Amino acid sequence: MKKVLVLSGKGGTGKTTVACALIEFSKSRAFADCDVDAPNLHLVCGFEKEPETNEFIGSKKAVIDSKKCTFCGICKSNCRFDAIKADKTKYVIDEYNCEGCGVCRLVCPNGAVTMCDDVAGETMLYKENRVFSTAKLKMGRGNSGKLVTEVKKNLFTNVDLKQNTLAVIDGSPGIGCPVIASSSGIDLALIVAEPSVSGISDMERIVKVLKGFNVRVTLCINKADVSTEQTEKIKAFCENQSIDYLGEIPYDKAVARAVNSGKSIAQTDCAAARAIYKIYERMEEILGVQK
Amino acid sequence: MKFSPKYIRAFTVTEDTEVNVAVLSGKGGTGKTFVSVNLACVVKNSVYIDCDVEEPNGHLFLKPQNVTTEDVCVLLPEADLEKCTGCRKCVDFCMFNALAFVKNKPYKFKEVCHGCGGCKIVCDSRAIYEKAYPVGVIQKGKHKDVTVVSGIMNTGEESGVPIIKKLMDKLGNGVNVIDCPPGSACTVKESIEKADYCIIVAEPTIFGVHNFLMVYELVTLLGKPCGVIINKDDNSDNPMVQLCEKYNIPLLMKIGYREDVAKSNAEGCIASEKYSEVKEIFDGLYRKLLSEVRS
């Protein structure tokens, strides 16, 4: 199974729209949404039944027993994450700031602190004739890298990896831990770039991060006609960096219409869909997969 | 999803009041930087703070002059091998599995170390000391009368949170416009911690609606008053408008999609400095923020 990860650096370039179209064109039966902070793929890759859901335990969080707390303040002075707040004559933990390090438990002279499992999100697994793994991180939480790893594990343990087909992973924006966790073990990364000064700056940073992984980097330009000048700059960058340039997609109002009706653009006949199909064909050549 | 908007406290803003306006979105690419940069440009002596430290963009438009740079470091543990007795208390303590004994020497997995200092505390032989590791920089400069403060995370680092915490020390005495990262995870929470008001920038697609709900939940849980800007509006039936009505969220304004503005944005131009109609839009937004907000 060849694993393709769709990334961008910049948010809003069209990762989910492109990923969903690739899934349709390749008739992929294995896909995942690793944008655990703001997952969207499930909105356009329709499944009939409800998924199997499981709680995701992120890390531990500290809990202070108010009956044992003597308000000595030793925990607060040792907490590096500003996670201990005074509440009248007791200290309480700020669950958003607490990183679960256990230092407060270590230093508390009264044994008032315990470390408890924190449910930081939920994983969802859709298994019909296709397998789709996704998740949602609880608001304000860290642990996104760990949850991404769980999403990938749920996908790959439920499919036949020996089949010569495509697994498509919709990634997240940025370059931090969820992107890093998504990128390991991937065969090909497709960067969906936006032809703008912001888009180029962000693209350069994600390319830099990907160089640290043993993954073939390819790129396509979405909404290419918004700026031909910036589009040409991106093409030149790809040549310079030995990145496979797979093609460009025009700005197309049909995309928003399709997305808003919960459909993949692969199900419509529009300029953007035709352009993504060409990109998919070039990707197939590189990977050598079958439908 | 059921949750009720918290009481929105009243506040009055003038140009001399310190007020922190955070601009966030949930979904990426809705126009946070577009709104933040242009809002900062219409407010005299404002401070623009870029908390999207993984992919900072504001400086590409504002092109700040006289830029100073400061490193942002985290303290990570190091072991003095001569003092280490191999007791492994540090390894046993670490909740993140960031320490291991390799060939009888303590080894640190930098990527998962949170820098909590716990291993240093448990070590009976005082073999652990701490060293500053750079994780990014903060750059400060000026664009006309706007102070531009950008946090930039080093590529390869896992989390921008330490840089965002440092950025919160750079808030000025007047109007601070905080350009937030996308999503609703820990980096966003850190960026809106000191916000007095949150502007949520939404786009008129179901992706936008879906991600909006998540970030709205975060904002209300933290007790922040907020309002919505619908960007790239195309005058079609807009799921976001119905949502604002349903949850009684103030809809500050709709900004219509314009190809010429999109193109100029793509080239790195500040739209309110190029198009007088856009300047008027942002003057109007600022006037809205200046008036009292009540629930």
Image (cartoon, coloured by chain):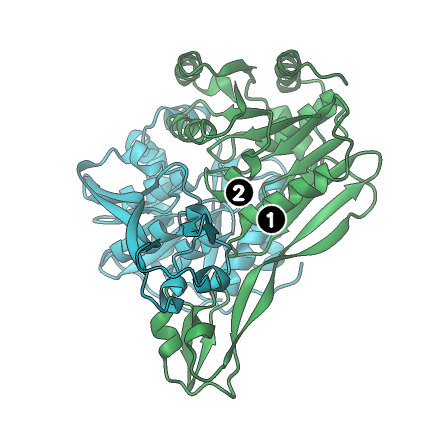
Whole-Å distance between the Cαs marked 2 and 1?
8 Å
Check disc 1 and give the amino acid type.
Answer: Leu
Q: Position of residue A96 (x, y in %)?
A: 49, 63
Compared with A92, A250 (above or below) is above
Q: Quadrant of the C terminus of chain A?
A: top right
Who's green, chain-wise? A
In the rendered structure, the answer to whether residue A75 lies left or right of residue A61 reads left
Compared with B143, A26 (above or below) is above
> Circle 2 sits in a helix, a strand or a loop, which is it?
helix
Q: Are marks 2 and 1 in contact (CB under 8 Å)?
A: yes
Compared with B48, B130 (above or below) is below
Mark number for residue A147? 1
* Residue with the most extreme left position: B66
Query: Which residue, given by chain and number where applicable, does mark 2 sit on?
Result: A178
Compared with B119, B264 (above or below) is above
Q: Is residue B167 visible?
A: no
Q: Residue at 49%, 50% (x, y): give it.
A: B228
Check disc 2 and give the amino acid type.
Answer: Pro
Q: Residue at 45%, 66% (x, y): give it.
A: B294
